[in-house]
Amino acid sequence: VQHFYPSHLSPNVAGGIDIADRRYPLGVVVGVGPFNFPILIPIVHSSMALVTGNTFISKPSEKVPSISRLIAEIYKDAGLPDGCFNLLNGGKDVVESLVCHKDVAALAFIGSTPAAKSLKMLGVENNTKVQALGGGKNHMIVLPDADLDMAADAAVSASFGAAGQRCMAVSVVVAVGDIADDLVKKIKYEPTQNLNEANCYILNTCHIREKATDKVYHDIGRVKKQFRKKI
């Protein structure tokens, strides 16, 4: 708690005057989590809010609502007083109602970039503190002296783990120097060369919904047309 509530004291800034900077709980804090991290994000949001003296409302993704209910039961079994951790299910309309509610002091959001921007603007309009993290993607840079077998394994795992449905997923692999052709060959054959139980689990992960699968096929088709090269 001391990490969250440090006291900054500037003594005797003027004759007989000290300046102290202190932090206090905000009040009601809302956490809106994404579908792809249904355990980690609600726990991180709620624990930081609760340990600093706030009450918490968890609004999980409507695609994975059940896990947050189990988290609520764990908190209750651990002795957390009623009303400290609250669970509210729903979609976009519920989130917008929360950020506009006069009793909500702050909202933490992790999800798509358009939704993050929209909530940020609603927070400004309603004087609600909003921490909004939009979708992120990563470039993997492979240097000329890299172990290409290891790099290929990392590229496949990072790109296709969780079917690519996470902000740490690698979207672009950048090969530095003249290693590109060799790296592509190793990436192409990596899944078949190392077919063990762990890799099969990674590569057979399903998309959260059919619309997400359709987008993947659309993006593959777009890349084929753009680069005129067989994938």
Image (spheres, rainbow, N blue to C red):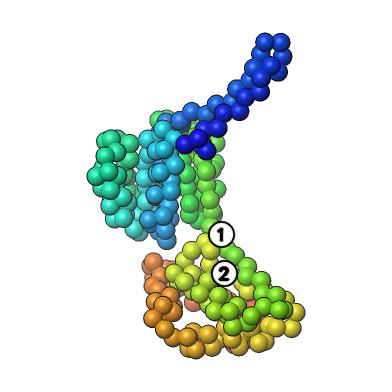
User: How many other residues sit within 10 Å of disc 1, few (<14), some (14-19) or many (≥20)?
Assistant: some
Q: Is residue 224 above or below residue 55?
A: below
Q: Which mark is residue 136?
A: 1
Amino acid at pointer 1: Gly
Q: What percent of the width, then of the height, locates residue 75?
A: 29, 44
Mark 1 vs 2, N-terminal side:
1
Q: Is residue 99 visible?
A: no
Instruction: For the C terminus, give its image quadrant.
Output: bottom right
User: How many other residues sit within 10 Å of disc 2, few (<14), some (14-19) or many (≥20)?
Assistant: many
| Foreground pick, 7 / 37 | 7
Q: What percent of the width, then of the height, locates residue 167?
A: 52, 61
Q: Residue at point 44% right, 86% down?
A: 195
Q: Which mark is residue 76?
A: none
Q: Residue at point 61% right, 28% down?
A: 8
Residue underneath mark 2: 170
Q: Residue at point 52% right, 29% down?
A: 23
Q: Is residue 16 above or below residue 114?
A: above
- 81 to the left or right of 51: left
- 193 to the left or right of 74: right
